[in-house]
């Protein structure tokens, strides 16, 4: 096997990405008014239990039919103004991006993922102070799953979003300490 | 009492020595920074204490082995030229920054999104929460985007950012850098990092760069001055290749 290239190291996103990375409709992956739309929401918290108001979350998921092809158009740009056009509302891109607000909260409006096995959204967490991003999964149901089944019960619970009223799912992300979210490493 | 640079220098040196000693003793080289890096104070409460849980990338149905795609609607032509986004020219040393986006097998990652953001020539971000007393430049926002071409190459025109102070400790200054956000073919390859410029005297004082404790890995964050990339009467050329980590579906297709 040939010598593999060494990877470019990760760095923190820092505090000043707010005018660069978030985009309008970043958290609206589902077409407006879609009857099957769900909302994944929650807080991002640090090791002292304080909310993190400067985290950025990237989401990737299967389409409702299970497709992992994705589609362009998450952040459609307007060449005449240099601004954003918003999503077209036709294609399901599978990609969402939300910065936490001053309360450390996020909300993602999307369609139910149709991946094989238990439905889940993949979440990539960035924050000031976090020198290398963290991956986790927000499972929308509990059941048999190779990853979940490998975890002790209290750790397993951190990956399962709690279903609420009106097709909402609560999924908090705790970077450290009690109830620390399970973070993943892909090998 | 506020920490001084020499307090931070001691912590950086201790962690560097411990890493070098571990590697000399046979420990694995660390290509990425340790999330637990106390000299960077904001990391203290923002790193997990439990070990990461391994997910076997050998299952092709793993959602993270695929990833978002972007296209011509997600960028405009002027997004890759940060010097033409306003009515006038930004102040500063104009640069052409270019390189290739590769996976660890050296294959180009084509048609993927690269986003950048940076301070202006005086070291100030066009971000309201940054209030240090350096001038804003009305002709510079410092945000760019592009898609890699068929060779995996990207190219930006911008100006050289200045170093800037920050609150980690007294007299803390970041070396000049450009933030990069990059996607691969798989979500596992997602990367956010920073590109630096050759021979910056601030490198040794900066706990963010030094959080990468492997010297060779740190060196991979530093662009090379490339005269062939410099444009006559126009810009200085810097070359910087990006290599993405993490498994992808293409590895499985090709039996890796
Ligand atoms: Fe910065």
Image (cartoon, coloured by chain):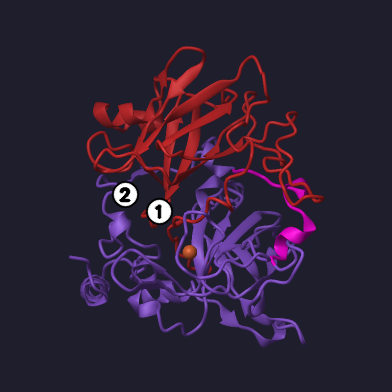
Chain colours: A red, B purple
- Tell me which residue sits at (28%, 57%) in the image: B36
Label 2: chain letter: B
**In the rendered image, which quarter is residue B43 located in?**
bottom left
Relative horizontal placement of residue B24, taking residue B207 as reference (left or right): left
Quickly name the residue at label 1. A128
- Tell me which residue sits at (69%, 58%) in the image: B146
Is residue A64 positioned above or below B93 on the image? above
Relative horizontal placement of residue A95, taking residue B191 as reference (left or right): right
Circle 2 residues within 10 Å: few <14, some 14–19, many ≥20 = many
User: In what quadrant of the picture does the N terminus of chain B appear?
Assistant: bottom left
- Tell me which residue sits at (30%, 50%) in the image: B47
Residue range in magenta is: B67-82
Is residue A31 positioned above or below B150 on the image? above
Quickly name the residue at label 2. B46
Label 2 beta carbon within 8 A of ligand 1: no
Circle 1 residues within 10 Å: few <14, some 14–19, many ≥20 = many
In x, y percent, where is residue A181?
A: 33, 37
Give the SS element for disc 2. loop
């Amino acid at each position: 096997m040939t010598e593999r290239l060494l990877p470019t190291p990760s760095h923190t996103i820092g505090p000043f990405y707010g005018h660069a990375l978030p985009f309008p409709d970043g958290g609206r992956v589902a077409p407006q008014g879609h009857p099957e739309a769900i909302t994944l929401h929650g807080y991002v918290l640090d090791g002292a239990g304080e909310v993190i108001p400067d985290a950025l979350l990237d989401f990737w998921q299967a389409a409702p039919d299970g497709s992992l092809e994705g589609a362009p158009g998450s952040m459609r740009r307007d060449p005449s103004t240099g601004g954003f056009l918003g999503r077209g509302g036709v294609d399901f891109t599978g990609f969402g991006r939300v910065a936490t607000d001053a309360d450390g909260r996020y909300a993602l409006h999307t369609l139910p993922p149709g991946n094989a096995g238990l439905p889940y959204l993949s979440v990539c967490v960035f924050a000031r102070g976090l020198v290398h991003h963290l991956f986790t999964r927000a499972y929308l149901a509990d059941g048999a799953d190779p990853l979940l089944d490998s975890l002790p019960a209290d750790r397993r619970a951190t990956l399962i979003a709690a279903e609420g009223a009106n097709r909402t799912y609560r999924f908090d992300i705790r970077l450290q300490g009690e109830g620390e979210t399970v973070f993943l490493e892909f090998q | 009492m506020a920490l001084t640079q020499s307090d931070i220098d001691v912590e950086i040196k201790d962690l560097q020595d411990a890493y070098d000693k571990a590697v000399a003793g046979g420990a694995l080289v660390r290509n990425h920074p340790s999330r637990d890096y106390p000299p960077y104070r904001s990391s203290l409460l923002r790193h997990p204490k439990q070990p990461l849980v391994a997910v076997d990338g050998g299952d092709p149905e793993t959602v993270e082995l695929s990833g978002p795609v972007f296209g011509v609607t997600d960028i405009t032509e002027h997004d890759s030229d940060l010097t033409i986004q306003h009515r006038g020219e930004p102040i500063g040393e104009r640069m052409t920054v270019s390189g290739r986006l590769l996976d660890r097998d050296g294959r180009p990652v084509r048609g993927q999104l690269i986003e950048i953001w940076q301070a202006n020539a005086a070291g100030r971000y066009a971000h309201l929460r940054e209030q240090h007393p350096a001038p804003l430049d009305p002709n510079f926002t410092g945000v760019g985007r592009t898609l890699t071409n068929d060779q995996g190459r990207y190219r930006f025109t911008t100006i050289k950012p200045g170093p800037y102070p920050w609150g980690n400790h007294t007299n803390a200054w970041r070396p000049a850098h450009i933030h990069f956000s990059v996607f691969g073919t798989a979500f596992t390859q997602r990367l956010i990092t920073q590109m630096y410029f050759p021979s910056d005297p601030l490198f040794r004082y900066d706990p963010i760069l030094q959080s990468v404790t492997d010297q060779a890995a740190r060196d991979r964050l530093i662009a090379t001055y490339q005269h062939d990339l410099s444009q006559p009467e126009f810009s200085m050329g810097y070359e910087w290749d990006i290599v993405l980590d993490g498994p992808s579906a293409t590895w499985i297709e090709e039996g890796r």
